[in-house]
Image: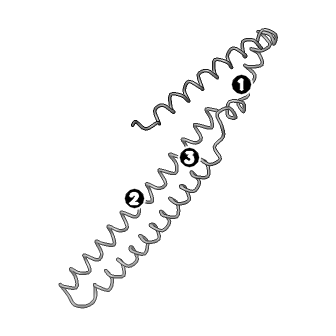
């Protein structure tokens, strides 16, 4: 149960780090493209031919890299959003996670063996009754909060 939470956290941090590195690469290449464009404008004013072609070519290359990085960033962000939406739709219940933990199941079996089934049935019945009262009380409280005041 905790391993799944740790894995989810690790995946989230990994995805965030990848997106942050792509955003940094986009910012860096855009800065370089703008620097070359500024250098090209400066050289054009200074000279009319020669070096300007090199500066414009450098700016074009870095601008192309920026566009490619921006597209990959958008694709990755949409993919992560789609994965998160899919995971939210198919989220497993906490009961399933608890029952999938073998240590919890083994502890429950040892508890049943130690207390005994004949003594455990009335305890579970009283616990279920208390849980039912708490659930109806909580539902009544939320319906009172949701009702509009006149």
Q: Are marks 1 and 3 in contact (CB under 8 Å)?
A: no
Residue at horizontal 57 percent and vertical 52 percent from the top: 85
Q: CA distance from mark 2 to mark 1?
A: 44 Å
Q: Quadrant of the C terminus?
A: top left
Sequence-wise, the earlier of marks 3 and 2 is: 3
- Figure check: 51 above or below 67: below
Residue at horizontal 46 percent and vertical 36 percent from the top: 147
Q: Say the numbered circle drawn on residue 6.
A: none
Q: Which residue is mark 2?
A: 24
Q: Quadrant of the N terminus?
A: top right
Q: Are marks 3 and 2 in contact (CB under 8 Å)?
A: no
Q: CA distance from mark 1 to mark 3?
A: 25 Å
Sequence-wise, the earlier of marks 2 and 1 is: 2
Quarter-of-image position of residue 48: bottom left
**Label 1: how many residues lie within 10 Å, few (<14), some (14-19) or many (20+)?**
few
In percent of width and height, residue 7 lies at 59, 41
Q: Nearer the viewer, residue 47 or 112?
A: 112
- The secondary element bearing badge 2 is classed as helix
User: Which of label 3 and label 2 is nearer to you?
Assistant: 3
In percent of width and height, residue 55 lies at 31, 80
Q: Say the numbered circle drawn on residue 11.
A: 3
Quarter-of-image position of residue 4: top right
Sequence-wise, the earlier of marks 1 and 3 is: 3
User: Which of label 2 and label 1 is nearer to you?
Assistant: 1
């Amino acid at each position: 149960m905790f391993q799944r939470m740790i894995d989810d956290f690790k995946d989230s941090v990994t995805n965030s780090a990848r997106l942050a590195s792509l955003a940094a690469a986009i910012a860096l290449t855009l800065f370089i493209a703008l620097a070359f464009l500024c250098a090209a404008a400066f050289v054009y004013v200074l000279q009319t031919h020669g070096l300007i072609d090199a500066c414009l070519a450098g700016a074009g290359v870095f601008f192309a890299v920026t566009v490619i990085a921006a597209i990959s960033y958008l694709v990755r962000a949409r993919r992560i959003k789609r994965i998160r939406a899919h995971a939210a739709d198919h989220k497993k219940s906490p009961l399933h996670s608890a029952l999938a933990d073998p240590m919890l199941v083994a502890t429950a079996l040892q508890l049943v063996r130690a207390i005994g089934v004949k003594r455990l049935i009335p305890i579970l019945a009283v616990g279920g009754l208390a849980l039912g009262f708490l659930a109806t009380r909580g539902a009544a409280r939320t319906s009172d909060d949701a009702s509009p005041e006149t």
